[in-house]
Structure formats: C-alpha cells, structure tokens
Amino acid sequence: MDKIVVLISGRGSNLKAICDSGLANQIACVISNNKNAAGLNIAQQYNIPSFIIQHQNYNSREEFEKSIAQVIDTYNPQFIVLAGFMRILSPWFVNKYHNQIINIHPSILPAFTGADATGDAIAYKVKLSGATVHIVTNQLDHGPILIQGIVPVLPDDTKSTLSDRILTIEHTIYPFTIRKLLMKQYTNINNIYCLTKLDTDNIYLKNLYNNIFY
Ligand code: GRF
C-alpha cells in the first residue's frame, strides 16, 4: 500500500482532516520541526509514529533536511505532504523528491504567495479567496496545481474569520487530493495535472461544493 509522510510545524488541523478522512493508516510517519506542535498529539491519537527534527539544532538547511530525508527514506513513501510545515525547502530536497512533495496554501495561487496569504488577501480587499493544493517546485508557492477551492471574503472579515473559512475548504480538498494521488487517479501531461476520471466522488463534490475546481 502506498504511503505518505506528513511534515508539520504547528496546529495540525490538516493532519487531523487527513486522518479523519480515513487515510490515517496510509500515513507512515509525521515529522515536526517544532517539538511543541499540537499536531504531534494528533499523530499520537492515531498511533502514527512521529519524529521531532528541530531546525535550530543544525548548522545549515541542508543538514536539517538530510536528517528529515533519512527518516523519510526509511519509509519509502509515495508522497511527502506539507501540512503547515513552516520551513522553506532547499532545491536539494525538492529535487530529491521531484513531483512527490505536495503543499496546501491558503490562497488562490498564484495570488498571495508567502507566509501571510490571508492577511494579504484582506489588505487587498479581494472578494474571493480560498486554498490551493499544488506540487512543490523550487519556486515558493508555485508548481502545478492539483485542486483549488474558493470562499467569499466578507466585508467585515478579519484575518481570523477568513482563515477559519478557508480552513474548512482546506479540510475538504486536501484529503480528497491525497486520496486521488494515492489511487493514481491523476495524470501529469506537460505538468498539467488532471483527474483521470470523473467518478462518483467528484460528482458528489460537485453537487456539494460548487466552489471546488480540479
Ligand atoms: C494552513 O492554513 C495551510 O494552508 C498552511 O498552513 C496552515 C496549516 O494549518 N500551509 P494546520 O497546521 O494544518 O492547522
């Protein structure tokens, strides 16, 4: 059975959504660069092995990442899922796991890349925002898009209310996309990723959420 490794730094609500969706037994392990990450408790609740690899303990990004890679390679996962992992990955790491690293970003990429996407969306006074699941490449928050979900931005939204609304869509689209990747239901033609078939899941999602695009 194909497995994933999940990298976290904090709260872990996406990790929880992935586990709750029935994918917990496909998570080989969770790696956190933050020993206080609440997401570590979620791994424990689901009996998923977890590792703490703190970047502060390494002299360089590459040494830190080599330590992460050593753990990842013991499990030989199909995909490495970034779920709120707050470290930028070096070209060495991204190239080593070419097309295997998946990220979720709280904006409709390519709008609002970077660490404060939700704050930037509020500041720009956009009317729509959302989340994007994409393949990680060497350009931050770029890379082939797998799925996007949109939500309205309301006039009285704060960063916190918008972020909560975006999170609800993240928790739907991230597990969905990971499941499809593990089921090998994506094709990659010239770096355009498409689902190979419109199955009942998709129709279900279409009816339920008119605001998810894949
Ligand atoms: C999410 O907003 C995700 O889009 C971003 O980091 C946040 C992680 O939240 N990449 P959580 O740790 O999964 O709750």
Image: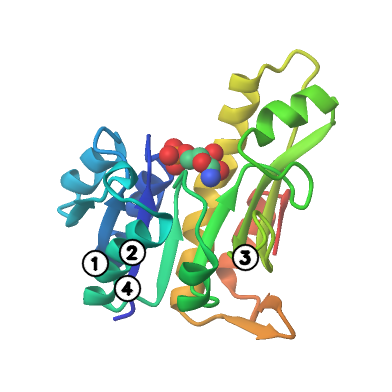
Which of pointers 2 and 1 indicates the residue nearer the eye? Answer: 1
Label 3 – label 2 distance at C-alpha:
20 Å
Residue ID at (76%, 24%): 122
Label 2 – label 1 distance at C-alpha:
9 Å
Q: Amino acid at mark 1?
A: Val
Q: Which mark is residue 138?
A: 3
Residue that label 2 marks: 5
Q: Which percent across, then down, holds residue 156?
A: 75, 13
Disc 3 within 8 angstroms of ligand 1 (CB): no
Which of the image's four quarters has the C terminus?
A: bottom right
Residue furthest front in the image: 59
Residue that label 4 marks: 3
Residue that label 1 marks: 71
Q: Amino acid at mark 3?
A: Asn
Residue ID at (26%, 32%): 36
Label 4 – label 3 distance at C-alpha:
23 Å
Q: Amino acid at mark 2?
A: Val
Between disc 2 and disc 1, whose residue precedes?
2
Q: Which percent across, then down, holds residue 46?
A: 20, 50
Disc 1 within 8 angstroms of ligand 1 (CB): no
Residue ID at (24%, 42%): 40
Q: Which percent across, then down, holds residue 11?
A: 37, 34
Label 4 – label 2 distance at C-alpha:
7 Å
Q: Are marks 4 and 2 in contact (CB under 8 Å)?
A: yes
Residue ID at (47%, 57%): 175
Is 123 displayed left or right of 84 in the figure?
Answer: right
Pick the residue in front: 185 or 111.
111
